[in-house]
Amino acid sequence: MPERYVYDFAEGSREQRDLLGGKGANIAEMTRVLGADRVPAGFTITTETCVAYMDGGRVEPDGLADQVAMALTRLEERVGKRLGDAEDPLLVAVRSGARESMPGMLDTVLNLGIGPAAVEGLAARTENERFAWDSYRRFVQMFGTVCRGVPGDALEAAIATRKRTAGVELDTELSVDDLRGLVADFEALYTDRTGEPFPTDPAEQLRQAIRAVFDSWVGDRAIEYRRISGIPEDWGTAVNVQQMVFGNKGDSSCSGVAFSRDEITGAPEPSGDFLINAQGEDVVSGVRTPDDLPGLTDRMPTVYAELVDILARLESHYGDMQDTEFTVEEGRLYMLQTRGAKRPAQAAVRFAVDAVEEGLLTRAEALATIDAGSLDALLHPTFSADAEPEILVRGVNASPGAAKGRIVFTASDAVAWANLGRDVILVRPFTEADDVAGFFAARGILTSEGGKASHAALVARGMGRPCICGASALDIDLAAREVRVGDVVLRQGDQIAIDGTSGLVTIDDVELVEPPPDPNFQRTLEWADELRRLEVRTNADTPDDARRAREFGAQGIGLCRTEHMFMAADRQPKMRAMIMAEGLEEQTAALADLLPLQQGDFEGIFEEMAGLPVTIRLLDPPLHEFLPDPEELALEIQRGRSEGRADLEELERTLERVHTLHETNPMLGTRGCRLGLIHPEIYEMQATAIVRAALAVEARTGRAPHPEVMIPLVAYEKELERMRALVERVVEREGGDGIGLSIGTMIELPRACFVADRIAAVADFFSFGTNDLTQTALGFSRDDAEGTFLAHYLETKIIDRSPFDTIDKPGVGWLVRLAAWTGREAKPDLKLGICGEHGGDPDSIVFFHDVGLDYVSCSPFRVPIARIAAAQAAVADTGRLA
């Protein structure tokens, strides 16, 4: 039996998201919920068809054309119209629909099926000649751009010329003759670009439009968005062919986007945008600034009441805040699509809390609606409450948060400047899908046109970037790279600050401060703590970091890197003195100087953690990292000779020591426990500082710290055995038997994973150092890989995501799973944690939960995110078991 590529809307459901894509599955579900009269009919070409098309070298799979023709015949029979009919034509929209929403990244063609004969029939049937020719010019414009690459700028320039000639400002003011002329202009541009006449056969138009949507899946902007969002390439996109309904039939018609709740704050009132006498593309493109949804109550009160009722029904049905598109055609409301609303963090937690209080969701279900990765926006800066900046302009508050930086006018400049370490604000009249890389690079986005449903707003909210749209007082000249507001002229590189929460723009250097606690966020964190199994610790090297992490809910420290303590300006000379020491006596004296400093560091951290576990990693990096760079030192010696410096002999001795310590590959050289075995006096000093600090804090506060000593870079069980013996001798000598100190190792080498059962015999805990484990397992040097070939690997789809961002589950993840399993086989009560950067990545946290680790550890600002992600992993696990 031939493969099935096409499903009618009436056949699908939301459970078929992987096959029908998010849009197709939701249209099918909406048809079931609201009825076929409310949702325009159509059919979906599956995501598997797209994959087959790509795998076949961009050739349609056998049988697709026949199945599309049969589905089209069924659609024509249902609606009583034929595609391209000269008297009463059926027009269709051809839209994409990936599993996960990719707003504006994939292509769409509207009004397909209109042509020279059909336009006259449409005009006669509707008795609206202007509507018919407006639909025709829109189709030729869209088809040319999407299907054959006619430059959009050239088409927009033709529109601008026609408006100037006609003496009008708006597209809606163009006459029928103007629109006829535009169609001719567009078709001439099409022929100039392609060398072919514009196609008039509706079947050929549909075939090309379907191909164009499939091809857009591998377009640059879609690839970039998938890279940023972690969407696999092999998912493909579906294609939805849907009967057109028309919002551009005059003042009794409109198109819009409606959210079941406020998409910025999450407040329980519908919100969105609409445009009278317009098609949906006008609303989402940002080219025209729409009206706020509540304004529909004055223009079409009955329609607004129907829409509010539908939004409530859809939200109740899906159990999530909804983002819908609608069209009103001559007073009749049609729902075109619905999806879970992309929303900023503050709206996500507000919805979760309200949904539980309203009885819509349980706590577990509410937590599952939150994008854990977006929550760091609640911890990031806002304008200081004391700031009273001079307001340059106000716009639509499209995505919350504050940012400041240098003005740039193109996405490419945003990327280039950000790569130089500069904070930038991307300023444009409106944004397009091709600007997605600039969104990722910029600190914030500012546009002069568009509203809360524009492309800029949707993408900014999805990425957690502050955004202001529709700041119409801005006169932006992209060619001159300048923006004018009255008499004020700003150029590329000038400083600007935006507050996406209030819509305020200023050129003052306003102070950005940490935001006040969000009570809804705190409630969701409390729920998460009730539901999660994984503990969440933090990576902290100072008392300040420890205090902040504790405020964020950290349950201890999973990684305290002692080498960072030696980098301080007052420590470096003492550390260098120890390294430069000649003989054990000199070295012992230098270590004695470091001991009280190290002890003081640990006391501060123990006090902040107030009895919670603190895992301290003994010195890990090679000693040469604490000495000057050899090239800089050689230059200093050269200058010293010419200047006759008194410390020349000391500089030369330092250079000689640097050369002695030099290693070809220091990452795999004398570091970690290897350093401790060769120089046990260093680890002995650190262990002494830990034990004395724990005893001192207990005596001072009456609360016993829980120190855990972690030996790094262990590959052989005998390495840990000898280092453990050293630490235990120190504990006994210092009288620290009562502090309950535990000793374990960081698992960061493949061999350690393979022999984890042997290492477990002499370990109280394992902490997976997934940063180095990823490097050693893959043979990647992170610093080199990220600056060279890793970007190429992502672009060419050798990998979908950086293994340093999300754990490489089949490779590095298998090593973690193996070590956890065999380690606990040997020692069932072995404590297991992870302290690499993956400990703060929501996707990786799900994996660590499944593996059975006891805790994750991450940077302080990622602790709240990890708490939510750990709860979501537990909820998902419970659901799978059920």
Image (tube, rainbow, N blue to C red):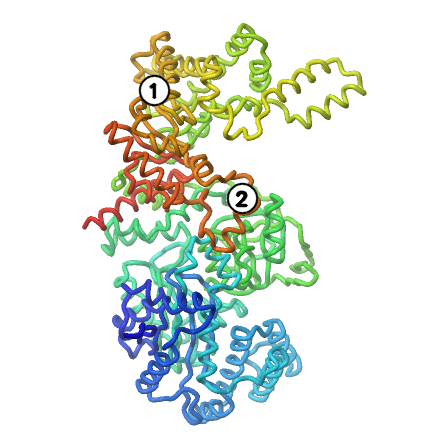
In this rendering, the answer to whether 619 lies above or below 365 is: above
The numbered disc on residue 705 is 1
Report whether 494 appears left or right of 337.
Answer: right
Report whether 435 appears left or right of 245.
Answer: right
Please tell me in which quadrant of the rendered image residue 299 appears.
Answer: bottom left
Please state which of residues 492 and 812 is positioned toward the viewer in this rendering. 812
Visible in this render: residue 842? no
Q: Position of residue 876 (x, y in %)?
A: 26, 49
Foreground mark, 1 or 2, reads 2
Visible in this render: residue 683? yes
Q: Earlier in the sequence, mark 1 or mark 2?
A: 1
The numbered disc on residue 786 is 2
In this rendering, the answer to whether 719 lies above or below 497 is: above
Please state which of residues 766 and 284 is positioned toward the viewer in this rendering. 766
Crowdedness near tag 2: few (<14), some (14–19) or many (≥20) residues, C-alpha within 10 Å: some
Q: Position of residue 48 (x, y in %)?
A: 36, 66
Q: Residue at x 47, y 43 (%)?
A: 380
Mark 1 to mark 2 CA distance (whole Å): 39 Å
Which amino acid type is shown beneath numbered disc 1? Pro
Which amino acid type is shown beneath numbered disc 2? Glu
Crowdedness near tag 1: few (<14), some (14–19) or many (≥20) residues, C-alpha within 10 Å: many
Please state which of residues 495 and 669 is positioned toward the viewer in this rendering. 669
**At numbered mark 1, what does the secondary structure look like: helix, strand or loop?**
loop
